[in-house]
Amino acid sequence: MTTHDGSHGTGPGNRHFRSKFRICETLNRTMQRYKLQLSHLTKRKLEIEADIASQKAILDANGIGMNEPLIDNEGFPRSDIDVYKVRHARHRIICLLNDHKTLMKDIEQALHAFHANLPRNGNSPSSPAHEGPPNDAAVDVVMPTRTFAVVKEVEIGSPADIAGLRTGDGLVKFGSVNADNFQGVDEIATVVRHSVGKPINVVAVRGASSVPVFLTPTQWAGKGLLGCSIHPA
C-alpha cells in the first residue's frame, strides 16, 4: 500500500509514527488519570477543611478553644458553655486534622507522580504537558528550588497547620511570588489578602524534599488569616 506522499504504509517511518502515536495516547491516559486523582483529592481536602471550619464555629460560639478546661474550679461541668457540643467538636477537629494530614501526603505523592510523568519536550499539540493538572490543583510544570522565605510559629489548628505547613519550612513558591521576583513579605501579604477562601499554590522545602501545599487564607479562632509568620530567608 502506498500513501499519498508516496511512502509505504508499512515502512519504518509509518511504524515509527504509529509507535509515537501509541506512546502519546498512553501518556494522555496516564495524565488524565493523575488529573482525576488530584481533582478528587483536592475536593476531599476542601470538604475536610469546611468540616473543620464548622466545628471551629461551635467552639467560637462558646468562646472556647481546643485546650481550655471543661470543668469549673469545683470540678463540675462549666455552666457557661455547652460542654457536650464543645467536647464533640474538639474530638471531631482532632480526627479531621489527622485525616487532613494523611490526605495532604496523598496529594503530595500524586503531584510528584504527575510531574514524573510529564513529557520533557512538550512539543506535541496533544501532549499532556499543555494540559496541566486541574485548576483547583494547579502546579507549575517546573518546580522552583530557591528558598526566599521561612515559615515560623505555625499555630495548631490554623489554616497553615491544616494545609500542612510546619515551622522551619522554607518557601520557594507562594502563589505568584518566588525567589526571582520576591522583594519583601508585603508581596506575600498581598497574595494572602486577594486569596481569602481560595487555595494558594505553595511549594515548601522541608529537609531535602519539596512539599506542595494548598494554603487557604481563612478567618479562624486565632490571629491573622494564616496562623503563622513568614520571614525573609
Image (tube, rainbow, N blue to C red):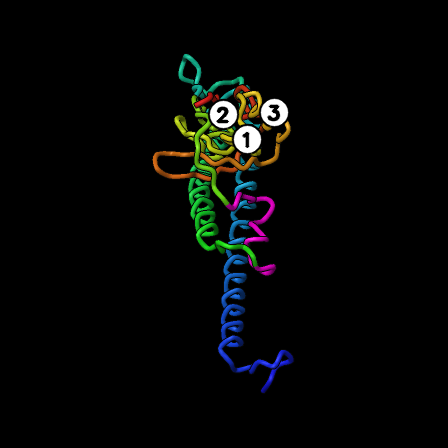
Q: Residue at x 46, y 30 (%)?
A: 171
Location of residue 49 in the rendering, given as x and y in whole percent from the top left corner: 54, 37
Mark 1 crowdedness (10 Å alpha carbons): few <14, some 14-19, many ≥20: some
Measure how far apart labels 1 and 2 are at the Cα level. 44 Å
Please identify, in this view, whether the residue under mark 1 or under mark 2 is nearer the observer.
Answer: 1
Quarter holding the C terminus is top left
Q: Residue at x 47, y 36 (%)?
A: 203
Residue range in magenta is 124-141
User: Furthest residue to the left?
Assistant: 207
Earlier sequence position, callout 3 versus callout 1: 1
Q: Which residue is mark 2?
A: 83
Please identify, in this view, whether the residue under mark 3 or under mark 1 is nearer the observer.
Answer: 1
Q: Secondary structure at mark 2?
A: helix
- The amino acid pointed to by label 3 is Thr
Looking at the image, do the residues carrying marks 3 and 1 touch, with CB atoms under 8 Å apart?
no
Location of residue 33 in the rendering, given as x and y in whole percent from the top left corner: 52, 58
The answer to whether any part of residue 12 appears in the image is: yes
- Main SS of the magenta segment? loop
Q: Secondary structure at mark 1?
A: strand
